């Protein structure tokens, strides 16, 4: 027979568990209805061929086989990777350089420059697409007009959006998101202990050595996080080419991105099963990227731990990480 | 009822009011809603896919409607109107080519709203000042020859250029219109791609020669934005493709062109060939889930087939009705000052019987995208070889179209319904 106190404890625990489940129930219901159920539906859908209202059949893994044998998928993947590399390899070094400039001690107007550089991200990507669509027009676009003014031999009908769509996308993305990434780097730079910088300076370390051996190791966790966000955001690129190319994939599908192809197959051709399989392939690619980021971060952290005493997370960085956007940024 | 065009909504409002006044109960009264094109598309497809009710009448633009015709015929979300159309004698009353975009396997799923014949709008002020008589232009070769004196600096590097035609390798609507006029097109009557058709090779070779050859005569002027309107006003291009509805667009958006433009039939590909093509199209369909299809059918006829609406459609929208028995209405003979006093309604009506047939398919968007890619490929070749005629471009066009066809067919074959059709059908293509 259970002692009265033990019985009371058990009852209290059960009551507390019930209360916890009750409080969690609304959240869990939302997750089940809006996340788990659609995910399960997407798994089932990827195994079906759909065609027109109410018409489908089970095809097993045929959609996945179709995706892997589809040249348009590979072209879309290649285009997306090029855009991603452009975003990461061009945008992030510029963002870091700007952050370092703004992090200079005694810089006047820091808040102003930070606002100016950050402000493009406050403009929606659709507007950015529309602005660049106008800027890059053949004859009337400001960019061709300007180049024709500077270079007399410049072809004013230069077709940016037809033959250099990827460059146009990278430029637009660069304009919009460099300031956004700069803010992450700025927060990270402000968390680098000034005494370490000072000690290195006193030891006669050059600017490059201070950057290489003091600054860079300290901002690697944030850097890898920003890289991951940029990769995820770049892989999700859809609105920008959609606006720049007016809903098409461009000449020779040069502007076809992986999500654009998903939209084309699912919502234009009505092949929802195939689009779902494409979605899972994208998820797989992004999952691998996230995993790689975690592994690399862990290794970098381990290397740091062995070479220096472990430090607490920088307070300046915590709010930035806590506010990270769910979709990422290209 | 859902419609996607403000002008349609404004035109229909009085007819809806008249209809509702005669209805004894609320059950058969019509509530008209104006939605964006994408909203109509998304709501319509959501309703059809889920089997849930939508509006009882949906006015759909051509490419939206095509999505509803996927799958087997019994799965089409719209009600089959064929028997009603036959019973009420509409097959003979309506221009035949207006039915085909809304048809699948011989069954009709929408009541046609328009015909949309296409002409060329040209800068009459410039052409007439040069003493050129466009009535001598019968073919595209004539067009280039007769208007060539108006070309200015066609190397594209100067600001005072003038080109003859608004056409570019990415203007897929124009590419489709020209292939249709030539006797080709992207989709055949079974809904299958027909990109390899010889007429398509001929059309895209000409497009490449005109836009990217050694002596280009065509350049792009965007139809729907301010930059394009400015180039139109500046007279950068002499001629632009003009379906009937485009006249209304220019009238409202570029009023500075009033009196400067005139219309002429499209030059034919060959002497005696079709002098028009087509761009755009709308239908009115009744979803299968509609509660009272008979009453809705009566309303659809009341709305689309009345003389009052035909007159309003032309007077306020410049669109000619597909109802042939209304073509004798004097409204179509009124001179239009915007187009130099031409009786443009009559001109469009005279061309309406020549409007080529177009067919809907869920693979239509993909086929057109591949057609555009093939055109770009030929354009690149034209530029590289500095082409002066279409002869060296034709084999390149045929090969590009063969690959475009193969690409599109790979998607078709993944689909069991269309795969069956493609196996039954003869190979696409052949002489025009």
Image (cartoon, coloured by chain):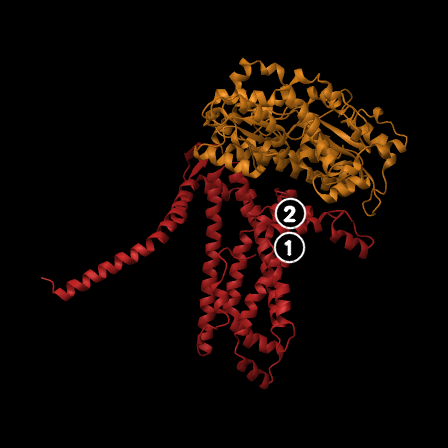
Chain colours: A red, B orange
Whichever of labels 2 and 1 marks the residue nearer the N terminus, that label is 1
Q: Is residue A92 above or below residue B324?
A: below
Residue B200, position as x, y percentages in the image: 68, 30
Q: Is residue A155 above or below residue B186?
A: below
Q: Are marks 2 and 1 on the same chain?
A: yes
**Does residue B104 appear anywhere in the picture?**
no
Q: How many marks?
A: 2
Q: In the structure shown, which secondary structural element does the residue marked by tag 1 occupy?
A: helix
Rendering coords of residue A189 (x, y %): 55, 72
The reply, left or right, for residue A40 in relation to residue A325 is left
User: Viewer-proximal residue, B331 or A230?
Assistant: B331
Residue at 42% of width from left, 33% of height from top?
A57
User: Is disc 2 in contact with disc 1, using a CB cutoff of under 8 Å?
Assistant: yes
Position of residue B223 in the picture relative to residue B84 (left or right): right
A3 sits left or right of B337 in the view: left
- Element type at mark 2: helix
For the C terminus of chain A, the image quarter is bottom right
Figure quadrant of residue B326:
top right
- The residue positioned 43% from the left and 41% from the top of the image is A46
Q: Is residue B354 visible?
A: yes
Query: To which quarter of the image does residue B268 belong?
Result: top right
Q: Nearer the viewer, residue B139 or B79?
A: B79
Q: CA distance from mark 2 to mark 1?
A: 10 Å
Task: Tell me the residue that label 2 is attached to.
Answer: A244
The residue that disc 1 covers is A172
Q: Chain of mark 1?
A: A
- Please state which of residues B427 and A64 is positioned toward the viewer in this rendering: A64
- Residue A159: percent from the left, percent from the top? 72, 47
């Amino acid at each position: 027979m259970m002692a009265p106190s033990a019985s009371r404890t058990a009852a209290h625990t059960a009551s507390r568990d019930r209360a916890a489940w009750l409080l969690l129930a609304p959240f869990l219901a939302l997750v089940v209805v809006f996340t788990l159920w659609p995910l399960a539906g997407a798994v089932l859908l990827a195994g079906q061929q759909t065609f027109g209202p109410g018409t489908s059949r089970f095809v097993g893994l045929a959609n996945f086989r179709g995706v892997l044998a589809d040249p348009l998928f590979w072209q879309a993947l290649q285009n997306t990777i090029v855009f991603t590399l452009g975003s990461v390899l061009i945008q992030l070094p510029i963002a870091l350089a700007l952050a370092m400039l703004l992090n200079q001690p005694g810089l006047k107007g820091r808040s102003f420059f930070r606002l100016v550089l950050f402000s493009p991200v406050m403009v929606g990507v659709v507007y950015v697409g529309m602005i660049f669509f106008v800027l890059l027009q053949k004859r009337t676009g400001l960019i061709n007009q300007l180049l024709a003014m500077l270079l007399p031999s410049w072809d004013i009908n230069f077709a940016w959006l037809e033959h250099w769509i990827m460059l146009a996308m990278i430029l637009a993305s660069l304009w919009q998101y460099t300031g956004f990434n700069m803010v992450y780097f700025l927060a990270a730079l402000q968390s680098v202990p000034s005494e370490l910088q000072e000690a290195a300076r006193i030891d006669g370390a050059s600017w490059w050595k201070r950057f290489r051996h003091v600054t860079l190791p300290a901002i690697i966790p944030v850097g890898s996080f920003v890289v991951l966000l940029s990769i995820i955001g770049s892989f999700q690129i859809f609105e920008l080419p959609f606006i720049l190319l007016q809903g098409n994939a461009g000449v020779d599908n040069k502007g076809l991105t992986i999500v654009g192809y998903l939209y084309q197959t699912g919502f234009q051709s009505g092949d929802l099963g195939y689009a779902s399989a494409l979605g899972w392939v994208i998820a797989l690619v992004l999952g691998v990227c996230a995993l790689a980021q975690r592994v690399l971060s862990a290794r970098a952290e381990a290397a740091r731990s062995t070479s220096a005493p472990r430090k607490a997370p920088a307070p300046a960085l915590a709010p930035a990480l806590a506010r990270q956007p769910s979709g990422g940024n290209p | 009822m859902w419609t996607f065009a403000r002008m349609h909504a404004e035109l229909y409002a009085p007819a809806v009011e008249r209809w509702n006044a005669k209805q004894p109960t609320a059950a058969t009264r019509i509530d008209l809603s104006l939605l964006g094109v994408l909203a109509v598309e998304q709501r319509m497809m959501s309703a059809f896919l889920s089997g849930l009710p939508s509006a009882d009448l949906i006015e759909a633009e051509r490419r939206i409607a095509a999505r509803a015709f996927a799958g087997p015929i019994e799965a089409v979300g719209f009600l089959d109107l064929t028997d009603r159309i036959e019973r009420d004698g509409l097959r003979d009353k309506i221009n035949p080519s207006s039915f085909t975009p809304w048809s699948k396997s011989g069954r009709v799923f929408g009541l046609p709203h328009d015909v949309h014949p296409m002409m060329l709008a040209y800068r009459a002020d410039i052409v007439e000042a040069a003493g050129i008589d466009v009535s001598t232009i019968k073919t595209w070769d004539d067009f280039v020859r007769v208007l060539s004196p108006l070309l200015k600096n066609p190397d594209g590097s100067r600001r005072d250029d003038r080109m003859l035609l608004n056409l570019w390798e990415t203007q897929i609507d124009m590419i489709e219109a020209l292939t249709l006029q030539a006797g080709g097109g992207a989709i055949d009557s079974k809904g299958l791609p027909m990109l390899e058709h010889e007429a398509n090779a001929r059309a895209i070779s000409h497009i490449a020669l005109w836009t990217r050859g050694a002596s280009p005569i065509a350049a792009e002027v965007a139809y729907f934005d301010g930059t394009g309107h400015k180039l139109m006003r500046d007279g950068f291009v002499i001629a632009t493709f003009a379906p009937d509805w485009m006249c209304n667009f220019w009238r409202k958006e570029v009023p500075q062109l009033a009196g400067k433009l005139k219309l002429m039939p499209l030059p034919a590909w060959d002497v005696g060939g079709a002098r028009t093509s087509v761009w755009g199209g709308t239908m009115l369909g009744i979803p299968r889930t509609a509660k009272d299809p008979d009453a809705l059918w009566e309303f659809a006829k009341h709305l689309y087939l009345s003389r009052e609406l035909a007159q309003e459609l032309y007077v306020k929208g410049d669109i000619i009705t597909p109802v042939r028995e209304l073509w004798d209405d004097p409204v179509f003979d009124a001179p239009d000052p915007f187009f130099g006093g031409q009786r443009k309604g009559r001109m469009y009506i005279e061309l309406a019987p020549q409007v080529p047939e177009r067919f809907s398919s869920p693979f239509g968007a993909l086929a057109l995208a591949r057609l555009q890619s093939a055109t770009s490929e030929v354009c690149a070749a034209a530029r590289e070889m500095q082409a002066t005629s279409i002869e060296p471009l034709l084999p390149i066009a045929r090969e590009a179209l063969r690959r475009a066809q193969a690409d599109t067919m790979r998607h078709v074959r993944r689909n069991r319904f269309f795969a069956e059709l493609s196996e039954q059908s003869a190979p696409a293509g052949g002489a025009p």
